[in-house]
Image (cartoon, helix red, strand yellow):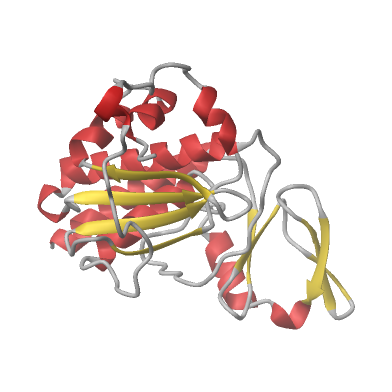
Amino acid sequence: MKRAVLFGVVGVMFLIAAQQAWAVYVVILRNGSRIVAKEKYQVKGPNALFVSKIGTYTSIPLSQIDVAATDKVNSQGLGDAQLLAWVDAKTVVPTPTPTPPVGALGHLQEGVAAKIGDAARPTPTPGITFRDAHYRDPQVDEAFQQGLESYHLYLYRTSQGTQPAYLFIEISVNGQPETLKALMAVAETYELLAKKAPGRLPERVELQMLNESGKEAGVFRISAADAAELATGKVTPENFYVQHVIF
C-alpha cells in the first residue's frame, strides 16, 4: 500500500512538471539508452533521421531503435519525463546545451562563503562517491531519478551513500544553470517525500556534481530540513549552493 501511494503521489507531481515542459520525442535504443529528439524520426532507407534536442541533424541505423519501447513511452504523453513504473537504469545519451561555466558559481555572491581562521577549513567528508551498492529503497531511489529527469537532467547515477541510510547521486552538469536545476530537482523530490512518505526518507542525500570535463562542480550532504528551505523558496538556489557546498 505504501509503495502504491508513493508511486501515485510522485507520479502526479512529475506528470504536471512534464506537461509544463516543451514537447520532445524520446528514442529508445535496443541497448537501453535514450536519445531526446525534437520530433519523431523519419525513416530513410535503413536509417532513422531526426533533429536532436539541441538542433543537430542526426542519423542512426533503424535497427538500433527499440520501436515498441519508443512508441510506448511517447504514447504516454510525458515527453522526456518518465512514469515511475518505467525503470531505466541504463546509460543515457547526453543532450548538452551550451551554458556559462560552472566555475562562475564561485562568484554568485562574493564574500558570502568567506570565513575567518579555522572556520575557513572545510568539514572533512571522505567517501562521498559512487559505490557498487544499491540504495536500500528502490522506489525512493527511482523517485529521485524521476525528479532529475523532470528537470531534463539525464546524466546521473545513484547508489548507497557513505551510510546505508544515505542516498548518493552523481550528476553530470553542463554549466551553472544545470547545477542550480539539479539542486532544485533533489530538494523538491526530498520535500515531496517528506510530506507524503516520511517513513521512507533517506537520512541524507549525498550529491556529487561533475562538470563537462569530469571535475567536481560541487559536493553536498543534504538533509530533509535543508531541502525544505530550498524547495519552499526560503533560500535561493544560488545561496543554497554557497551555504551548503563542501569545498
Return the residue found at the far right.
Answer: 45
Seen in the image, is 126 located left or right of residue 224? right
Tell me which residue sits at (53%, 57%) in the image: 155
Tell me which residue sits at (50%, 41%) in the image: 19
Q: Position of residue 173 (x, y in %)?
A: 55, 47
Q: From the viewer's perspective, is residue 216 above or below residue 2?
A: above
Q: Position of residue 49 (x, y in %)?
A: 83, 65
In the depicted view, which residue is nearer to us: 145 or 100?
100
Instruction: Assign the C terminus to one quadrant of the image.
Output: top left
Tell me which residue sits at (31%, 51%) in the image: 206
Q: From the viewer's perspective, is residue 120 above or below residue 150?
A: above
Seen in the image, is 69 located left or right of residue 46? left
Seen in the image, is 40 located left or right of residue 30? right
Image quadrant assignment for residue 74: bottom right
Q: Position of residue 196 (x, y in %)?
A: 17, 45
Q: Position of residue 152 (x, y in %)?
A: 54, 47
Image quadrant assignment for residue 70: bottom right
Seen in the image, is 231 located left or right of residue 109? left
Return the residue found at the far left.
Answer: 199
